[in-house]
Amino acid sequence: MFFYLTTLSLQKFIKEDVPVLPDETPENEHFLVIEAWKHSDFMCKNYVLSGLEDDLYNVYSGVEMSKELWTVLEKKYKTEDAGLKYHTGKSIELAKILQKRRVNIACVQETRWVGSSARDADGYKLWYSGVERGKKGVGILVDRELRESVVEVRRVNDRLMVIKLVVGEYTLNVISAYVPHAGLSEEVKQRFWEGIYEIVRQVPPAEKLFIGGDFNGHIGASAGGYGEVHGGFGFGERNGGGTTLLDFAKAFGLVIAISRFPKRREHLVTFQNGVAKTQIDYLLLSRCDSGLCKDCKVIPSEALATQHRLLVIDGGIRLSRITENQVGSLD
């Protein structure tokens, strides 16, 4: 970053304060000099901010001067790789949670990571897809045992991606999905649902399908006309987003895993903030494979994100030498 600032002739602003001019400096000249300095300092500060990961940007965007920003970043992160260290650190922190809970595959949403790439994260491999800095983004992590079994990665957009694994006699399709929230336009929502419908239609009947996502909807506590997809052990009141999800599941013969098992309240809440406790994150699988799902629950003590909770399926598929597997979802 320092070299980049040097090429722009802005490097001095990370070391200098606002210039102090002699008292006899004419008022007009004083104004022009100070305004020119402030403009260049503003440019320097924003070039530094643009090199940070999204969460760091949000933390430090309120800093007023380049020198102050550079000093605090250099002290805490050694500025040149602050963004990379934070990005990598967050991935590793998530990987450690997944290792602790013996989760083999995890779907993550609202990652806010830009690009269509892959990286290692403490034994897991993370594939991710994001377009706009600080917004949306999805990813899928696969552990050391299964990462070499991934034969296809398809990044549809920053709300949908799918990977295919072939292990032994099984072919697994895992989709990470992030549904537009209620405040967005109907056009945006329709585009998402058209995309996921198309993906699921392309999955051959003989292959297994798992979907983990933030669906931004409430399926409700009871089945209420959706007994084939809703197991009757839900949470809260159904809303329009929940009905859309249930209709989708019904159309493709899927079941919503968490609704099939009676749980205490704390093991049903997937999202919690200062004013509400709700269930908006779900794991879905084919109805014909529902017998493979031994359990599905929220683990409230594991929260890498401040508001979302880790939701896991305990699966009974025998993959290589692994006898029990978990698929997880976390925003």
Image (cartoon, grey):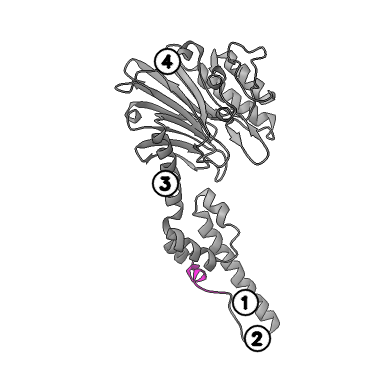
Label 2 element class: loop
Q: For the residues marked 3 and 1, what is the alpha-carbon distance in whole angstroms?
A: 42 Å
First of labels 2, 1 by sequence position: 2
- Mark 2 residue crowding within 10 angstroms, few (<14) / some (14–19) / many (20+): few
Please tell me the numbered disc located at residue 33. Answer: 1
In the depicted view, which residue is nearer to us: 37 or 222?
222
Q: For the residues marked 2 and 1, what is the alpha-carbon distance in whole angstroms?
A: 10 Å
The span shown in magenta is 9-17
In the depicted view, which residue is nearer to us: 141 or 321?
321
Q: Provide residue 179's location: percent of width, then percent of height.
A: 60, 30
Residue located beneath label 3 in the image: 88
- Dots 2, 1 in contact, CB < 8 A: yes
- Picture layout, residue 284 above or below residue 51: above
Q: Is residue 165 magenta?
A: no
Q: Residue furthest left?
A: 321
- Mark 4 residue crowding within 10 angstroms, few (<14) / some (14–19) / many (20+): some
Q: Which residue is at 41% across, 38% downward?
A: 95
Q: Provide residue 283's location: percent of width, then percent of height.
A: 52, 24
Q: Identity of the amino acid at label 2? A: Thr
Label 1 element class: helix
Label 3 element class: helix
Q: Which residue is at 41% across, 20% downward?
A: 172
Q: For the residues marked 4 and 3, what is the alpha-carbon distance in whole angstroms?
A: 33 Å
Labels 4, 3: front one: 3
Q: Provide residue 275's location: percent of width, then percent of height.
A: 68, 39
- Mark 3 residue crowding within 10 angstroms, few (<14) / some (14–19) / many (20+): some
Residue located beneath label 4 in the image: 207
Please tell me the numbered disc located at residue 25. Answer: 2
